[in-house]
Image: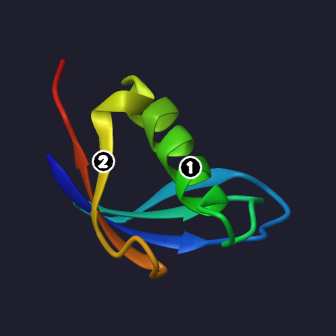
Amino acid sequence: MIINVRVTTKAKFKRVEETAPGCLKVYVSAAPEDNKANKAVIKALAQYCGVRESQVLIIQGERSRDKRVEIREG
């Protein structure tokens, strides 16, 4: 499954919310440096989708707020 994700970094709270079918907004407290925010996004999405972190892959937008993420099945 591929979803579009909009990321807000340095947020005061961590949250994942659905904005439209197949689109999520992810708030993480990590800063966008040294790949910390991407790791936090992967962790948040894994928890939200109920999968392991290794099943979540950023396929586009690694250095952007707008990302395309693949959630791999079992």
Residue 23 appears at what percent x and percent y?
Answer: 31, 65
Instruction: Say what amino acid the circle numbered 1 marks.
Output: Lys
Residue reaching furthest to the front: 34
Kindly identify which numbered label has been placed on residue 57.
Answer: 2
Q: Residues within 10 Å of mark 2 (few under 14, many from 20)?
A: some
Instruction: Say what amino acid the circle numbered 2 marks.
Output: Leu
User: Under tag 2, what secondary structure?
Assistant: strand
Q: Residue at 55%, 43% (x, y): give it.
A: 44
Q: Residue at 69%, 71% (x, y): give it.
A: 33
Quarter residue 72 falls in: top left
Q: Is residue 32 above or below residue 27?
A: below
Residue 30 appears at what percent x and percent y?
Answer: 74, 60
Quarter residue 35 falls in: bottom right
User: Under tag 1, what secondary structure?
Assistant: helix
Quarter residue 69 falls in: bottom left
Q: Disc 1 to disc 2, how far (Cα)?
A: 10 Å
Residue 9 appears at what percent x and percent y?
Answer: 68, 71
Q: Is residue 32 above or below residue 39?
A: below
Please give the residue where the numbered disc 1 appears in the rendered image.
39
